[in-house]
Image (cartoon, rainbow, N blue to C red):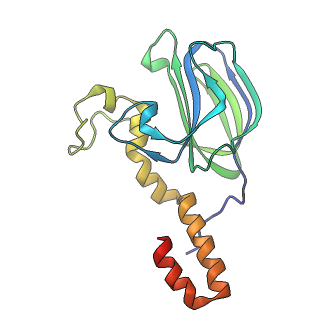
Amino acid sequence: MKWIDNNDIYPILKELDLNRKFRYFWLKYVTNVNLKRHCAPGLTGPYDKRISIYQSRQDQSHWEDITLDQGESDFYYICGVATPYKWDENFHCVLRCVPGETLLLNEQSVTGTIENAVRVPIHEMDRINSTNPHKDDPKYYTCRNYQFAVEFDNLTLKYGSKRKRFVQRKLEQIERKNPTKATETQITLL
């Protein structure tokens, strides 16, 4: 099986404007999830320090021409927490890299254009899977970061992952050089 590779093409934030104040606004390269946590700590991976606002730094409201290449990730999560806080005015956008596609944003007072990207929907849930220990805790089941985290494994299976593509490329290189060694290597890489 061959995995689709983005050939080192990354999403490019051509322009992003905040037309209101946000208490927090960040972009994270999601590499994994921690279902024991909700909000940002439930999404494992580095923040892009170029796209972040915290209470002490409210002056930033415009970004342009930023290539999202600061970490290896299959999914990028942009989150804005409204100020004053009203959960329904928060901004949430999950995207993944698709070369040649363009994502236009115009919601929750956020406008922008991101090239080489498509949006990944976050499905709201009234209650989480009945075996989840947080199924009755509204801090979890109403949190859109957590809703995405719950779907993360399925999305990784659906779209593939950079780790799997890396392993596949290595195996293909080894197989071209030495077909017998490729089988042995496959066992250790996986």
The one of 15 and 167 positioned closer to us in this rendering: 167
Q: Is residue 54 left or right of residue 6?
A: left
Quadrant housing residue 17: top right
Residue at 21% in and 43% down: 130
Q: Is residue 122 visible?
A: no
Q: Is residue 161 left or right of residue 172?
A: left
Residue 168, position as x, y percentages in the image: 58, 71
Residue 93, position as x, y percentages in the image: 55, 34
Q: Is 22 situated above or below 172?
A: above
Residue 13, position as x, y percentages in the image: 72, 36
Residue at 64% in and 13% down: 58
Residue at 62% in and 25% down: 52
Q: Is residue 115 visible?
A: yes
The one of 177 and 106 positioned closer to us in this rendering: 177
Total residue callouts: 0
Residue 145, position as x, y percentages in the image: 44, 34
Residue at 38% in and 32% down: 38
The one of 141 and 58 positioned closer to us in this rendering: 58
Q: Is 154 situated above or below 187?
A: above
The one of 51 and 91 positioned closer to us in this rendering: 51
Q: Residue furthest top?
A: 84
